[in-house]
Image: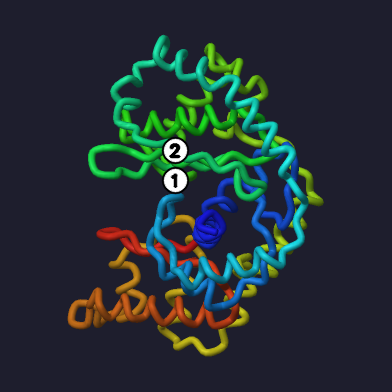
Amino acid sequence: MKLICFLAKNISLGYYQNNGFLVLPYLERGNSRAIYFPNLGYSKEFWKAINVNSNNDLSASYSQKAIDEVKNSLKKYKNENFETKIIKIKLDWYKMEKDFFGDIDKFLNFGKALAKVEKINVLITPFGTRGSFNPPRVGNKFNLNVTSRVDCPAGNIASGILQNLYIIKTWIGGEIRDENYTKRMSAISFLMTSSIFNKYYPNFEDLTKPMFTVNRGIVLQSNNYLEKLGLKNNKKNLLDELRNLTKQEEKVLKELVGNTGNYVTFDKIGEILWEDKIDEKYSLSAMAKVMENLRRKIKGIGVNKEVIFTKRGKGYLFL
């Protein structure tokens, strides 16, 4: 249940879509760029609970209301039985587990990081990305959380564990689109493709490399699914559909949309709002109120994802 909430949060924030990943209501086997997000008929209350939650990692606490909705919906969800596949992955992992940790001890300087690990939790699931991971601290120790998708071999678990240990050792985490993510994934990809660890997952795909070919049919399916969920943001339609904007809100939104992906500074927003009276009227709290109203009105037309972000000390970003 928590995994579905974690996926919903990251999809809502646009982390997957903005980095070439496809969100689909089914498992696209062997496609590391596909995210299986089941179509559970999510309510507006679910998306509200997801968006209010400020955390977006695998170990985060999510609204009990959202978790209960997922739990109840999954009971009715018709899904392929993956039990045989899951059992095989578990057996394959048990066969390689001892050698894997032996290779860590021999070839990697992860001894101190591994000594801090109290427990490793592994979830083999049809949902989500190829794999997710997070090492939450519990006192002076860490519990490693790893998910591995059922269409990946057991060696994918090795990749997730290595990423957790790398984060514990270096404190380099990072979300999909930032520099730390690229550093971590480059290091892990090197280990999984060009070192002794390649034997655990010979067909490991380096996701930091550009994707040169795209199945247009799957892209269309993903776009349609996101639109159905209220998560696909069509900038033109957004401006057309928001009929109840004040003149100030409309000017601000046009500026943000026109600079999609780039921060619009607080000073620039101030110029738009107060023009030649900016010196006497400038107020960050008043600016924040305008943004709060914009966010509310955008969600009011069925857009369930966050599209306006605040960067402390910098400005506002539209994605």
Which residue in the protein does label 1 denote? 175
Q: Residue at x 58, y 34 (%)?
A: 207
Identified by mark 1, the residue type is Glu
Instruction: Read off the residue under disc 2.
Output: 181
Does the image show residue 255?
no
- Measured along the vertical axis of the image, is residue 95 above or below residue 23? above
x 43%, y 75%: residue: 252
Residue 123 in sight here: yes
The furthest residue to the right: 217
Q: Quadrant of residue 151?
A: top right
Query: Dot 2 lies on which element?
Result: helix
Q: Does label 2 or label 1 sit earlier along the sequence?
A: 1
| Residue 196 in the image, given as x and y percentages of width and height | 53, 12
- Cα distance between the residues tagged 2 and 1: 6 Å
Residue 226 placement, left or right of 193: right
Which amino acid, by three-letter code, is at mark 2?
Tyr
Say which residue appears at 37% left-offset and 34% top-offset.
167
- Label 1: element kind: loop
Quarter of the N terminus within the rendering: bottom right
Rendered position, 68 above or below 116:
below
- Please report contact status of discs 2 and 1: CB closer than 8 Å, yes or no: yes
Judging depth in this view, the residue of 130 and 318 nearest the camera is: 130
